[in-house]
Every structure is written in C-alpha cells, then in structure tokens.
Amino acid sequence: MNQYHAPKRVIYTPESRIRHPLQMLQEMGRDLLASRELAWRLLVRDISAQYRQSLLGIFWAFMPPVVTAFGLVMARNTGVVNLGETELPYPAYVMFSMALWQTFVEALNGPIMAVNAAKAMLAKINFPREALVLAKLGEVAFNFGIKLILIVGLFVWFQMPVTWAVLLVPVALVHLVMLGTGIGLVLAPLGALYGDVQKVLPMIVAPWLLLTPVIYEVPQSGLFGSIVRLNPVTPLLVTTRELATTGVLTDVIGFWWASGLALGLFLLGWMLYRLAMPFMVERMSS
C-alpha cells in the first residue's frame, strides 16, 4: 500500500499528555482543523432539528429579549422598580443588553449540552472532540446573527447614531463568547458524568444576570457597585454595548483584564476537556 494513503495510527500510552504541553497544544490545533467538516455537519443537523418542530421558528431567537424588555419597561414606567437612567432609550438598552447576555449564556451552556447530547456517539466513534464544541460555537454565532436583525431594527427605530467604533464590536463579542465557552469547557466533563451540573447552572445564571448591568447602568459606588464591577462579564458586555452605540469606552482596563481571564479560562478549559474526555468515554461505555 502506498505510504501516503496509509491510515493514520494513534498510539495510546499511560503517560499523561500534560507532561508535554507544547506537543499537546500542537495536537489541539491539529484536531481543531481536522474537526471542521464534522462540526459543519453537526451544526447543520442541530439547527435543522432546533427549528423543524417549532411553530415560531427563528422568532424564538429574539422573543426572550423582547418579552423581557417589555416587562421591564412596563415595571419601570409604572414606578414598580427604579432602575435609574440609561444612556440609551430604555427599551433599546434592555433588548440589546439582553441579546448580549443570552449569547454569553448560550456559549456557557454549549459545551455541556454538546457532550451530553453526543454521549452515544462518543462511546462508539473516535473523532476529534473539538467538533462538538466548534458546532455549538457555530450555533451561538447563528443565533446571534438572528438577534442582529433585532439590534439593527432597534438602531433604526430609535434613530441611534453609529460611530466607526462599531467595527470593533466583533472583537469584544468574541471575548464575551470566549469567557462563556471557557467556563462551559471547564464544567463539561463534570456535566457529562453528573446531571446535577445542568440543574444547578440555571440557579447560578439567574442571580448572575442581576449582578450584570443588563437592565441597569453600572453603579459607580457602594458594595453592590463593587460586586458588579468585579463580575468579569460586566466589562466585556459593557464594552461591546458601548462600541456599538456611543463609541466611548468607560472601562478599558477592566475590559483587557476580563479578556485575559477569558483567554486563560478558554485554554485551561480546552486542555481539561481533552484530558478528561478519554476517562469520560470509558465511564460512559462501562
């Protein structure tokens, strides 16, 4: 047989891959490239399944921020809650911020949901595990693309000006998604073995939303303001919103601090994901 057509051989050894971090990073990059085609097929399958049996279809992508904003605007206008003033028209402020928050949460849940949904495939087929995460990231991007229709509509309806800084929005948004995906990758191995993770996550995400300036501006003083500013989602979400609207950044240092944390968590989560997957597959197959 021609050597160039010989199947690739994979040799498994008891030695941990973490002992050779450079080699491990090279393998991660190689498997990421090799997983593109499978990730695309999984993405098409998941998106088709997501909307195939839905009456409202893609409207579900931006119905939650619209409904949430409607409730909050009603509560604010009637004086039930006092959320302070915002630099943008409040309905636009809430809907835009909620769309960014949902994108972060989708990125966080993505790796956990992908691994749980692919348990049967993982136990039977050997393939680059990065394909599962890559497909979910594609789904996050697809859903945000749908939300973008809502966001553009908000800008037109409220006649909100756009500056050149809007071109940098994808950079800040990628950092926000990277933070969510990094946390999701860290939790994915546990989530595959224990169903408690998926049950606990909503109990964490709900109060986390209240500690993020989605429905109010960042408080500038007090204990609550300090907690909100220490929240790593705050500078990433606020910077994305500011780049898309005013173009004036209020916390550049916080943004880069949170971006560094997001990158570190993403790489750590990715390495944990790769190291844990063989053990997870063994447990799931037994």
Image: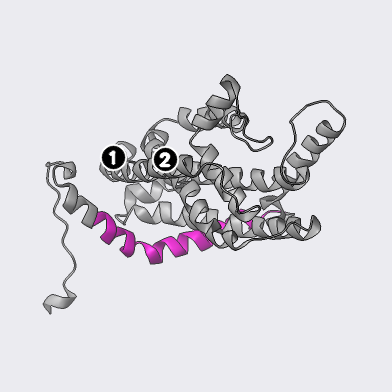
Q: Give the range drawn in magenta.
A: 27-54
At a point 15% along the width and 49% down the height, the residue shown is: 12
Residue at the far bottom: name it. 2
Res. 79 image quadrant: top right
Measured as percent of width and height from the top left, residue 50 is found at 60, 54
- Earlier in the chain: of badge 2 and badge 1, it is 2
In the image: residue 40, left or right of residue 99: left
Mark 1 lies on residue = 276
Instruction: Give the residue drawn at x 78%, y 26%.
Output: 81
Q: Which of the image's four quarters has the N terminus?
A: bottom left
What x and y, as percent, mark residue 285? 31, 41
Pick the residue in front: 262 or 219: 219
Residue 33 shown in magenta: yes
Q: Name the residue under label 2.
A: 257
Spatial distance from mark 2 to mark 1, Cα to Cα? 28 Å
What percent of the width, then of the height, locates residue 205? 56, 32
Numbered disc in front, either 2 or 1: 2
Residue drawn at (12%, 42%), measured in percent from left and top? 15
Residue type for callout 2: Trp
| Residue 48 visible, this angle | no
Q: Total number of numbered labels? A: 2
Q: Relative to 180, is 99 on the left or the right?
A: right
**Residue type at the position of mark 1:** Ala
Nearest to the observer: residue 205 or residue 161: 161
Residue density around tag 2, few if under 14, some if 14–19, many if 20 or more, within 10 Å: some
